[in-house]
Image (cartoon, helix red, strand yellow):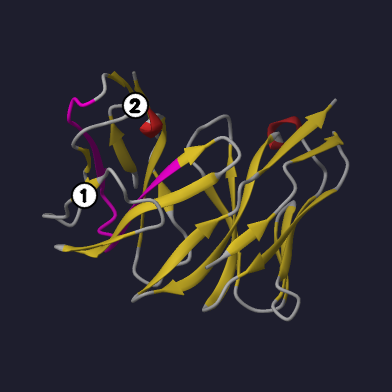
Amino acid sequence: EAQVTQNPRYLITVTGKKLTVTCSQNMNHEYMSWYRQDPGLGLRQIYYSMNVEVTDKGDVPEGYKVSRKEKRNFPLILESPSPNQTSLYFCASRVTGGTEAFFGQGTRLTVV
Amino acid sequence: GQSLEQPSEVTAVEGAIVQINCTYQTSGFYGLSWYQQHDGGAPTFLSYNALDGLEETGRFSSFLSRSDSYGYLLLQELQMKDSASYFCAVREVQGSARQLTFGSGTQLTVLP
């Protein structure tokens, strides 16, 4: 089954404790991206990657890092989480030039 | 920069027709997409319009007018399961990539 898998689905952590949210896709998509969703603000892009070892900032990259060492994986790293990073996070993938993005099930992160 | 506007809430009764409008301001416009999201779950792709006109997929249709920077999603024969959030998203060039930028979403409530 074609899918984008995020882990964990839910996470509660404390300010300053480094965490990683994993994202993996099995569709051989070149393009992957991370979004955060906050009430009334829709989905805002954090980082994107056009292929292995090619990443770039989206609209809200501050406080986040990413890496793309393999085509299927695109982890999101919060080196020192803060309460304003409490949000619902989505990973998405698509073929380069494709019109349909496939989303993971989301990770609900709470930073206290 | 870019901006998209869509109503925050729409309510309709089962069996009715509802139209969700989206206006956008962006440079490097390629097309307009629509996504559906149930209760914080994964957004799922509904439609994409690159050219002016109406695209029909079952009970859902999507329209685009590039000259007016306007589009809409039309849902016919509404069912209870259509209660969800609907996002318009512009596909646009930012830097070296074609990005997907989302509106803030419209919460559709279908009443019995």
Q: Which amino acid does label 2 sit on?
A: Arg
Instruction: Name the residue at 73% across, 81% down.
Output: B67
In the depicted view, which residue is nearer to us: B102 or A40?
A40
**Can you tell which quarter of the image residue B29 is in?**
bottom right
Instruction: Name the residue at 49% across, 72% down.
Output: B92
Q: Quadrant of the C terminus of chain B?
A: top right
- Residue, disc 1: A66
Q: Is any part of residue A71 visible from this angle?
A: yes
Q: Is residue A11 above or below residue B30?
A: above
The first of marks 1 and 2 along the sequence is: 2
Residue B50 lies left or right of residue B16; in this view the side is left
Residue B53 lies left or right of residue B3; in this view the side is right
Q: Is any part of residue A74 visible from this angle?
A: no
**Can you tell which quarter of the image residue A91 is in?**
top left
Q: Which mark is residue A9?
A: 2
Magenta-drawn segment: A16-36
Q: Where is residue B11 in the image (x, y as percent from the top left)?
A: 82, 36
Q: Position of residue A97 (x, y in %)?
A: 39, 72
Q: Are marks 1 and 2 on the same chain?
A: yes
